[in-house]
Image: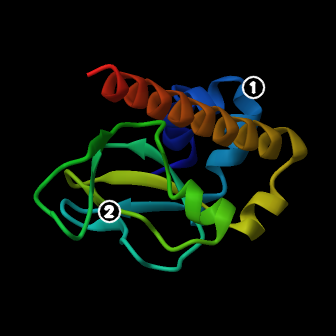
Amino acid sequence: MTGSTLADLIAKLPVFKVFSRSVQEQIASMDNNFLRFHANEPIVREMSRERDFFILIRGSARVTRNKKPDQIIATLRPGAIIGEMAFLSGATRSSNVICNENGVVVMRVTELSLAQMSPEVREQIKDSLIELLVERVNEMNDRLLRLASK
């Protein structure tokens, strides 16, 4: 996949939309941070200690748990952030994320790669992580309220 193709893909994602085309191309040129997966290949495995997180660039993936591997908890689409809790807390992975099709592309973000990004890019990625966590807390609160009202 060429840098310009990656730049075109990431330009469509909320986390990268705010950047100029030149910054998007700079991100896309970090080609060793982009990984390609095949159908049914795991991006992350439950209980692994890996701390990197990923941004889904192309394709879709399903979230499962080891106890019920056939039960799909969620389906992730481009723009989804994967593995942020392990990155932020150092905890083991809480679920599996498995590719639904061939050609799934993710951007792997490590502590080192984050440190090497420009401050503008680093701050936007951090802001996206914060937004994601706030969104999840709000969703959990809504679920708790629904359960309490039953």
Instruction: For mark 1, give the secondary structure.
Output: loop
Residue 5: % across, % down: 49, 40
**Residue lying at 73% horizontally and 64% vertically, measured from the top left:** 113
Given residues 86 and 121, the one toward you in this image is 86
Instruction: Tell how many labels.
Output: 2
State whether residue 45 is above or below residue 88. Answer: below
Q: Residues within 10 Å of mark 1 (few under 14, many from 20)?
A: few
**Residue lying at 52% horizontally and 43% vertically, measured from the top left:** 6
**In which image quadrant can residue 40 be found?**
bottom left
**In which image quadrant can residue 11 be found?**
top right
Residue 66: % across, % down: 23, 70
State whether residue 95 is above or below residue 63. Answer: below
Residue 110: % across, % down: 67, 66
Q: Label 1: which residue?
A: 20
Classify residue 34 as left or right of residue 119: left
Q: Residues within 10 Å of mark 2 (few under 14, many from 20)?
A: some
Residue 21: % across, % down: 70, 28
Q: CA distance from mark 2 to mark 1?
A: 28 Å
Q: How is the image coloured?
A: rainbow
Classify residue 20 as left or right of residue 57: right
Instruction: For mark 2, give the secondary structure.
Output: strand
Given residues 95 and 144, the one toward you in this image is 144
The label number, if any, that marks residue 50 in the structure image: none
Q: Amino acid at mark 1?
A: Ser
Of the 4 image quadrants, the one containing the C terminus is top left
Given residues 126 and 103, the one toward you in this image is 126
Classify residue 96 as left or right of residue 70: right
Q: Amino acid at mark 2?
A: Phe
Evaluate if marks 2 and 1 touch, with contact meaning CB atoms under 8 Å apart: no
Q: Label 2: which residue?
A: 37
